[in-house]
Every structure is written in structure tokens, then in C-alpha cells.
Amino acid sequence: MNTPKLLSTTSLVAGLMISRWFQRVITGPINDLVKTMKSVTKRQDFSERAVKRSDDEIGMLCENFNGMLREVQLGRDKLQQAHAELEQRVIERTAELK
């Protein structure tokens, strides 16, 4: 094999290896986070959490997304509790009027 073909083949193999590394390290966790976001949006299940794989910026993104989900769930729980309390008050007040 001559030198230009060997260099081309080596470059191609190196490029593929780097591409697979990017896929595993960067694109994979981002795609997982997007899947979690879509699932939460579709199912409205705010108890679901994104899996944090690393301590880098993508890991911080997962942590903050999970924190946002906790706050949304807490707010939803408080709203449901207030709604239940309001319904109970209406029942009590209606009974008082009879």
C-alpha cells in the first residue's frame, strides 16, 4: 500500500473513532436528556428524572433539569392540595346554608 492511501485510511479510521467518541460522550447524554424531556412533556410525570452520567456541563444540565422538575412537582402538589381544601370549604359552607 502506498503512503497516500495509508494516510487516507488512517485518517478515516481516526475520524470514525473520534466520531464514535463524540457520540458516546456528548451526543448520547444530550439525546437521553431530550428523551426524558419529551417523556415528561407527554406524560406530565414530573417525578421522572434525567440520568446524570458525568460532572461536566451536560451533567450540570441534567442536575438543573431535575431541579426544575422537583420544583414543578412541588408546585403541582401544592396546587392540588389547595384545590382539595377549597373543595372541602365549599362543601362545608354549602352544608351551613341548608
Image: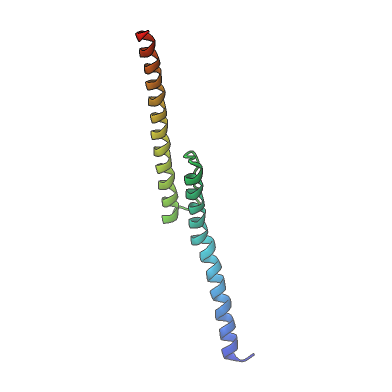
Q: Is residue 24 above or below residue 85?
A: below
Instruction: Report the front residue among 34 and 11.
Output: 34
Residue lying at the far right of the rendered structure: 1
| Residue at image coords 40%, 47% | 64
Q: Which residue shows up at 56% across the image and 84% down it? A: 8
Q: Is residue 94 above or below residue 18?
A: above
Percent x, y of residue 74: 40, 34
Q: Residue at x 51, y 52 (%)?
A: 35
- In terms of depth relative to the viewer, which is nearer, 38 or 62? 38
Q: Quadrant of residue 5?
A: bottom right
How many marks the image carries: the answer is: 0
Nearer to us in this view, 76 or 12: 76
Q: Residue furthest bottom?
A: 2
Q: Nearer the viewer, residue 58 or 46?
A: 46
Q: Position of residue 39 (x, y in %)?
A: 51, 47
Left or right position of 91 against 48? left
Instruction: Report whether 42 appears left or right of 94.
Output: right
Residue at position x 39%, y 10% in the image: 95
| Image x and y of residue 42, in percent | 50, 45
71 relative to 7 in the view: left or right: left
Q: Name the quarter where the C terminus is drawn.
A: top left
Q: Quadrant of the N terminus?
A: bottom right
